[in-house]
Image (cartoon, rainbow, N blue to C red):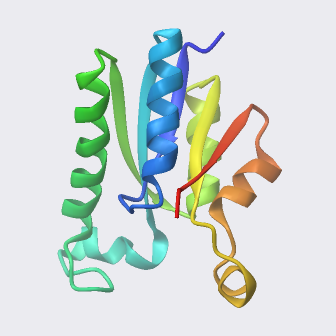
């Protein structure tokens, strides 16, 4: 049923719910896990220019650490992985990657924002769900 599962991550604690569910499903179907980290366009200068991100971190290092954490968890379960780091608008990059790689399922977390924070920041997950042409499983982190 599922041969390829896309698990986007931003390395946050909230994203871990999506990672856990994605790996569980991939293991159940012996699917390849695609791990994608999207560097928002506003932070892309950090990769090109070598400057730190908004909190002073090296964005490339953060992206690599986030993807490698998921890869290690997948490998612990005996799963094959493919990784990618893209730069752009997160929901657009996730949708484009899903189409380009012909993944069967996208599994991602929601940060659980509400009220004004959600209004101001929007929701990458919500935009993916609204625009996806393939199944999207949304996992909410435990509080």
Instruction: Give the image location of residue 114, x and y in percent.
Output: 71, 78
Which residue lies at the image location 73% right of the left edge and 59% below the top edge?
A: 126
Q: Quadrant of residue 106?
A: top right
Q: Vertically, is 124 above or below 85?
A: below
Q: Quadrant of residue 116?
A: bottom right
Horizontal side of 119 relative to 12 (left or right) equals: right
Instruction: Give the image location of residue 115, x and y in percent.
Output: 74, 85
Which residue lies at the image location 28% right of the left edge and 86% below the top edge?
A: 55
Camera-side residue: 39 or 48? 39
- Tally of numbered discs: 0
Instruction: Give the image location of residue 58, x and y in percent.
Output: 19, 72
Camera-side residue: 27 or 8? 27
Q: In the image as oriented, which residue stretches furthest toward the front?
A: 143
Which residue lies at the image location 51% right of the left edge and 33% below the top edge?
A: 22
Q: Vertically, is 89 above or below 98?
A: below
Q: Vertically, is 138 above or below 76?
A: below
Instruction: Give the image location of residue 62, x and y in percent.
Output: 25, 62
Q: Vertically, is 66 above or below 48?
A: above
Camera-side residue: 135 or 37? 135
Quadrant of the frame with the N terminus:
top right
Which residue lies at the image location 64% right of the left edge and 62% below the top edge?
A: 124
């Amino acid at each position: 049923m599922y041969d390829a599962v896309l698990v986007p991550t931003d390395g946050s604690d909230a994203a871990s719910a999506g990672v856990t569910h994605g790996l569980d499903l991939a293991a159940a179907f012996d699917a390849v896990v695609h791990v994608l980290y999207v560097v928002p366009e506003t932070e892309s200068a950090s990769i090109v220019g070598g400057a730190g991100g908004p909190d002073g971190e090296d964005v490339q290092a953060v992206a690599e650490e986030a993807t490698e954490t998921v890869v290690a968890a997948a490998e612990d379960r005996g799963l094959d992985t493919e990784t990618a780091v893209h730069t752009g608008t997160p929901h657009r990059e996730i949708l484009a990657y899903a189409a380009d790689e012909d993944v069967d399922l996208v599994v991602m977390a929601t940060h659980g924002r509400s009220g004004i924070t959600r209004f101001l920041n929007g929701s990458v997950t919500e935009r993916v769900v609204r625009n996806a042409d393939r199944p999207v499983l949304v996992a909410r982190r435990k509080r």
